[in-house]
Amino acid sequence: MAEKAHTSSVYDRALQSIKENLLFAGALAEQAIQRAMTCLLERDSDLGRNVIDSDMQIDRLDEEIERKCLDVIALRQPVAKDLRFITTAIKINAHLERIGDMAANIAEKAIALNEEPQLKPYIDLPRMSDTAQQMIKKSLDALVREDCDLAEEVIKADEIVDSLNDQIFRELLTFMMEDPRTIHRALLIMQIAKNLERISDHATSIAVMIIYLVTGRNVRHRDKMEKTK
Amino acid sequence: MKGNLFYKIFVTYIIIILLAMATVVFQVTGQIKTKLMDKIESDLTVYAEMINLTYSKEEIESKLANLANLADARITLIDAAGNVFFDSEAPALEMDNHLNRTEVQEARVKGKGSAIRYSHTLGIDTLYVALPMVENTDIRGYVRLARPLYEIRKTVGAFNMLIFQSFALVGVISFIIAFIFSARLVSPIQEMEQFTRKLKDGDISGMLLINSSDEMGRLARNINYIVTELQEKVNFANEEKGKLEAAFSSMTDGVLVLDNQGRIEALNNSFKAIFGIRRRDIIGRTPLEAFRNIELENAIDKYKETGLPVAEEIILGGARNMILDVSVSSILGLPKGEEKTMMVFHDVTRLKKLEKMRVDFVANVTHEIKTPLKAILGFIETLQEGAISEEDTARKFLQTIRKHSERLNRLVDDLLAISNIELGETPLFFESVALGGVVESVLAMINPRAQEKRIVLTKDIPEDLPPVNADRDKLNQILLNVLDNAVKFTPESEKISVTARLHEDNNHVMVNIADTGIGIPKDEIPRLGERFYRVDKTRSRELGGTGLGLSIVKHLMKAHNGAMDIDSRLGVGTIVSLSFPIFKSVEES
């Protein structure tokens, strides 16, 4: 990473270019979720189709980042923090690619929902997507600033999204019990909520990777370990 | 703490003084010693000669003690073989052969001998002088006189004492002089050193105060001159910088400057406000790291590819939701390798919104007018095609045509009202109006419709409420429009209340119209005053609204110097607060 330059500036440039590609992929993912949710909330199906099409871009970047990381491993034999960065980059890359897929999923469901009248005013869903988007934004900011506090915030926010998901599930359940005609729409909304919940999980994983990158400390299974103690 | 230079000069002085004194002492004591030695030697020689000439051997023996006393010397008589046969201080028989002593040998060869030896018995250098006792050219023996050099030691000691005393005095004085002199020589240099160090650290205020006509003084004057020039230049530069910075930071457009590495180097206050970021979070980062805005990246890439200024529209997503015009261009006049990029962000959210509103307005007006017109045309066509002969149907159709025409009429009236208020062409007759009466009459008008939906209307207007300054008809219209909305959007059997009270500032009367209706989503509230804006489009039109009611209220409130505020929660209800200025008679105001 750029703080302490290597003797080889080509090496530095390779690492910086991986970082830039990662951030670009992150920006695309952020935008994809934003657009997918706008597609749902403002019933703008064109925007949704746009999201599905532009998922290709994230996929291409995914391949490129992976290739660049492997090149660095093969050519430079990175050690210490560089090695952590490369392994982290490979993982974050995979998470971002999945987030992109999920945004496309949300867009698909939103387009389907737009074909029918709106089931109910969306209140928890925008809240959930705002939190999830904030989480991705913060986790990428944490990557840029190497800021563990920010990463910890992301990890904490995951609970909010989880509880919102439960809340949406319970609410939709009552809709479906009252009127079977709503089942199709309710299931679509539920899938959207599930996707948002998964997105926030991916953001949490990214945050965990960043703590590992900065401190070398692995907090991945911290909760489970604390429970077993 | 004095600097090094002072010690160097001072120590040099002291060393010179000490060296001078040491040389003097060494030379003078040497000289004194030689002279005294010569004198003692000649003294002893004279005595020896005298003894030799005056006395016979036997006489000497008898008078030796006296002689030794007189000559202040030890007298030794030695025979030709070297045997001591008489000594004034030691028993002669115990003494060893003296023939090989330096002075005796010398006396034998040269006729006179002398030597200085350290006497272990006395612990001091002793001078020996020997002369041969000659009888008919035959050496019969030797006379030897010895005197310990107490005198020399004493004289040299006394002399050294004297020299030491005077040197101590001179030393102290020269020490002081050397100190003062070195200090005087060094102090302006130190002063200049401190001053220039201050300059180096960036403080360019002040002057050197050294009054001297020598090189130091000239050096100080030169430094002062340079500093004055520097001060002027820095002041000038600061002023220019201040002007530029003031312009830079008070610009309403956000500005971002990138260095030749494409990293953020500077930003102004507006930029911080637009993006809602902290300076330290983005300085030194690339725009991608800092913002991750795809459209911004595309604009920068386009600029990098073409090298020409780029103007693009970008959307700032998330909570900010802004539309910005960004122009990317290079900063001219910088040396090669230090090219900088400037990005100017102009907030066009409002403009875009207004543009959208205008487009929406035209679309809405055409739509609103076209719907009743289509119905009217359709019914007229049906009538023309024969329905007119069936009286019942014709009457029903005419009724419908009339309904739609009235709607059209209402729409045009409302539009006219709005545009007149906006243009300021609606004459308002301000007078003292008691709210109680107006509310009463409005409620009477609205009551039949409320009763249809079994809505309970309540009012709470205090008797002592001061009258408001308003146009009675328009006040009527405002309250009617708001209450009409309330009745329309409140489900059956709910409640609507009208309350009024004096605002804390004693200058306004607040009228609250609260319902327990369906409520309005929070993000829709700011758009409520827009023309044709409806939260629920289909339903509102069914209820016969033109979409202009609240817009008229908003404009009328503005014309009354009042304000409208809407607070609402979905499913709980809506409170519309209207504030009117209270009436003040001419004398009061």
Image (tube, coloured by chain):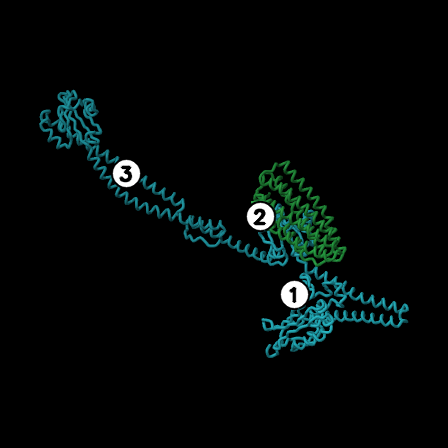
Chain colours: A green, B cyan
Label placed on residue B25: 3
Q: Are marks 3 and 2 in contact (CB under 8 Å)?
A: no
Image coordinates of residue B569 in percent, x first then y, are 66, 63
Q: Is residue B388 above or below residue B28?
A: below
- Decide if residue A54 is on the left or right side of residue A223: right
In the figure, A7 relative to B225: above or below? above
Q: Residues within 10 Å of mark 3 (few under 14, many from 20)?
A: some
Nearest to the observer: residue B455 or residue A201: B455
Q: Name the residue carrying label 1.
A: B567
Q: In the image shown, does A3 or A66 lie closer to the viewer?
A: A66
Residue assigned mark 2:
A148
Mark 3 lies on a secondary structure that is helix
Subunit under mark 2: A
Chain assignment, label 1 = B
Instruction: Name the kind of residue labelled 2 in the image.
Output: Cys
Q: Is residue B12 left or right of residue B220?
A: left
Considering the image in quadrants, where does the C terminus of chain B appear? Answer: bottom right
Q: Is residue B316 at least partly visible in the picture?
A: no
View extreme (bottom): residue = B587
How many marks on residues?
A: 3
Q: The residue under label 3 is which amino acid type?
A: Val
